[in-house]
Image: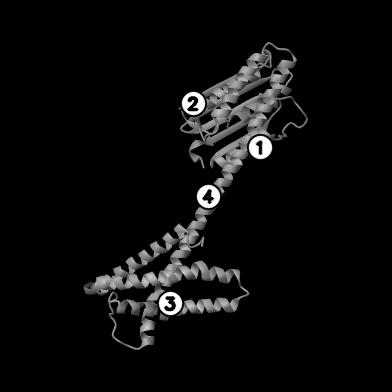
Amino acid sequence: MKRILDIKQLNFYLWTAAAFLLLYSFVESFAYPGTIIPRVINSFLLVMFITVLNFILFEFTLPFIKLTLKWVLIGFLLIASLLVFYTFGLYAWRYFWIQADVYTSFIPDTSLLNDVLVHSQFSFTYLFFFTIVRHIYNYTKLISTSKQLRIEKQEAELNYLKSQTNPHFLFNTLNNIYSLSRDKSDLAPESILRLSKILRFMLYETSGEYIAIEEELKILSDYIALEKLRYDDSLTIKFNKVVEDIKQPLPPLLLIPLVENAFKHGVSETRNQPFVDIQLSISNQQLLFIVKNSVEESSDLYEVKENIGLSNLRRQLQLLYKDYNLTVQKETSVFTSSLTINLLSHV
């Protein structure tokens, strides 16, 4: 009963029947212009009958045969029964409406088999038309469903990555505050205040798909200020930005992983002359974000190991943009992260 009450499926059968009736009547209007109205009535009655047969064939008979292949004989009998309805049944349906003075016969009286053959041509023409339309409809529906599933999968993965990134970011920030509190620093209250601003932003501003670039810059500035509280005047921080349009939309918290990485895995491990140099440029919807930070010299000079923040950012970029480039490079005492995005290439 569930299949019978499927409104979308029923609508498909009705619209297909209407399309065939319109097309068939259009052709007949050129061949028989003087009798087009009764011929349309005839075609409507025939199409109505065959539509019911098509519904039974495609929605019940064929699915039943697929599910019960061992009952080959039953399947054969069902198909044979439907063929009888497509041929002799259609003729009987026509004859019923002739007796009711609704159907107008335009063929001369001939044998029963000849009449059945003539109307079977109409029946199988419509069946062929319906089969092609149904195949195209199902294929289009499958493509649409697959696309929707792919979008939902990407959204789920993107939300998962965000859910990983935010706790990771907060965990690092709380560690910083813990360090200040343990040292009984007078800066601890200010750091908690700045953290509350960041938390408020995460709770109320990052749920949407985009935020204005000015909002992203505010959270970056708050985070930099929060990190700076941990260090003395030996830390040098530069943050230069040239933004053509501060209302330019950008996915929230997209840039902060690179800045966070500079402090956690660079400055915090640098003993001499720590620095962070941040350059942001957005022009003609082309974004360039470069973060340089000090690192300690080591034997693995050019070896770069991506942490969870960089790995998540790389995957988010894959899901969000078609045209982007993220590179990280380690030199003697400098670690450089460079991100370019064509903001027009959003998926």
Instruction: Judge depth for marks 4 and 2 and give the one in front.
Output: 4
Within 10 Å of the Cα at label 2, are there few (<14), some (14-19), or many (20+) other Cα atoms?
some
* Residue marked by disc 3: 86
Classify mark 3: residues with Cα within 10 Å, few (<14), some (14-19) or many (20+). Answer: many
Percent position of residue 198, x then y: 59, 24
Which element carries disc 4, helix, strand or loop?
Answer: helix
Instruction: State the residue in front, 104 or 198.
Output: 104
**108 to 305, vertically: above or below:** below
Q: Which residue is mark 4?
A: 148
Cα distance between the residues tagged 1 and 4: 26 Å
- Where is residue 81? Give x, y as percent: 49, 78
Q: Which of the two discs, 4 and 3, sits closer to the camera?
A: 3
Q: Which residue is mark 2?
A: 243
Residue located 49% across and 68% down the image: 58
How far is the residue under mark 4 from the one under mark 3? 38 Å
Name, please, the residue furthest toward the bottom.
111
Alpha-carbon neighbours of circle 4 within 10 Å: few (<14), some, or many (≥20)?
few
Give the image quarter of residue 76. bottom right
Mark 4: amino acid: Gln
> Which of the two discs, 3 and 2, labels the residue nearer the N terminus?
3
Disc 3 marks a residue whose amino acid type is Tyr
